[in-house]
């Protein structure tokens, strides 16, 4: 009889850490690591609200950017810091200024719920409004979970901000790059 595999928990087992006044670095990947969010040219890509070089977000990437920025308008007590949209994944920093709550209901949210809202909103908008076949996508989907890192101090924050800002320059070496021959 096959044995049941015990999965390692994705989140830290510290009560309240994902609802408290912390900053988090998150990474969310497209299912199958399909490159559909942007095109990197000359190692440059869209960074938050600024575009460097000749990089361009695809229509799918534009929806991802709009969805990420809009969660700050839907949820009280959060701040959206640096983020970058890569061809098949997204990195962002989100800070809880206080306990996050839905603006319309006051319901308390944790990091997993906020990422679920982002993923759901962006997926629905992409599927409704995009001719996905033009991007060789049959059915846009995010991977099931996401990566998170609790930002511990200013030094950690600056290291992660530098990583986000330099991530496009390192695309050829990125472990998420399907064309990477490493």
Image (cartoon, grey):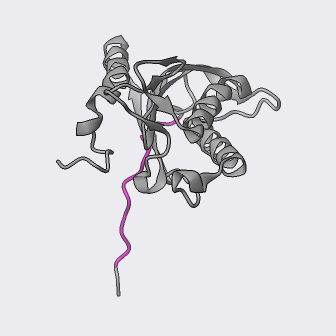
139 above or below 160? below
Q: Quadrant of residue 164?
A: top left
Q: Residue at x 24, y 47 (%)?
A: 180
Does residue 21 appear left or right of residue 12 in this picture? right
Q: Is residue 5 magenta?
A: yes
Number of residue marks? 0
147 above or below 18? below
Place of residue 48 in the rendered image (x, y in percent of width and height, measured from the top left): 51, 21
Does residue 138 appear left or right of residue 108 in this picture? left
Question: Which residues lie in the magenta part?
Answer: 3-15
Q: Is residue 88 magenta?
A: no
Place of residue 133 in the rendered image (x, y in percent of width and height, measured from the top left): 58, 57
Place of residue 52 in the rendered image (x, y in percent of width and height, measured from the top left): 42, 18
Q: Residue at x 47, y 37 (%)?
A: 38
Place of residue 64 in the rendered image (x, y in percent of width and height, measured from the top left): 58, 36
Instruction: Work out which residue is located at the far top of the displayed protein and give it.
Output: 154
- Is residue 27 visible in the rendered image? The answer is no
Q: Residue at x 41, y 29 (%)?
A: 150
Q: Quadrant of residue 118?
A: top right
- Is residue 29 visible in the rendered image? The answer is yes
Instruction: Work out which residue is located at the far left of the displayed protein and give it.
Output: 182
Look at the image and tell me in which quarter the N terminus lies: bottom left
| Main SS of residues in magenta | loop
Q: Residue at x 55, y 54 (%)?
A: 141
Nearer to me, 83 or 53 = 53
């Amino acid at each position: 009889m096959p044995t049941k595999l015990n999965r390692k928990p994705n989140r830290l087992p510290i009560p309240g850490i994902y609802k408290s006044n912390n900053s988090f670095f998150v990474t969310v990947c497209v299912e199958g690591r399909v490159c559909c969010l942007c095109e990197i040219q000359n190692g440059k890509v869209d960074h938050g609200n600024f575009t460097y070089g000749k990089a361009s977000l695809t229509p799918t990437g534009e929806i991802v950017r709009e969805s990420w920025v809009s969660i700050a308008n839907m949820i009280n007590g959060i701040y959206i810091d640096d983020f970058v949209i890569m061809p098949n994944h997204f990195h962002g920093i989100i800070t809880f200024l206080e306990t996050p709550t839905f603006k319309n209901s006051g319901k308390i949210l944790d990091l997993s719920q906020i990422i679920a809202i982002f993923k759901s909103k962006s997926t629905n908008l992409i599927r409704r409004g995009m001719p996905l076949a033009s991007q060789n996508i049959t059915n846009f989907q995010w991977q099931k979970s996401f990566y998170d890192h609790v930002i511990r101090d200013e030094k950690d924050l600056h290291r992660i901000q530098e990583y986000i800002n330099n991530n496009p320059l390192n695309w050829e070496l990125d472990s998420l790059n399907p064309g990477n021959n490493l």
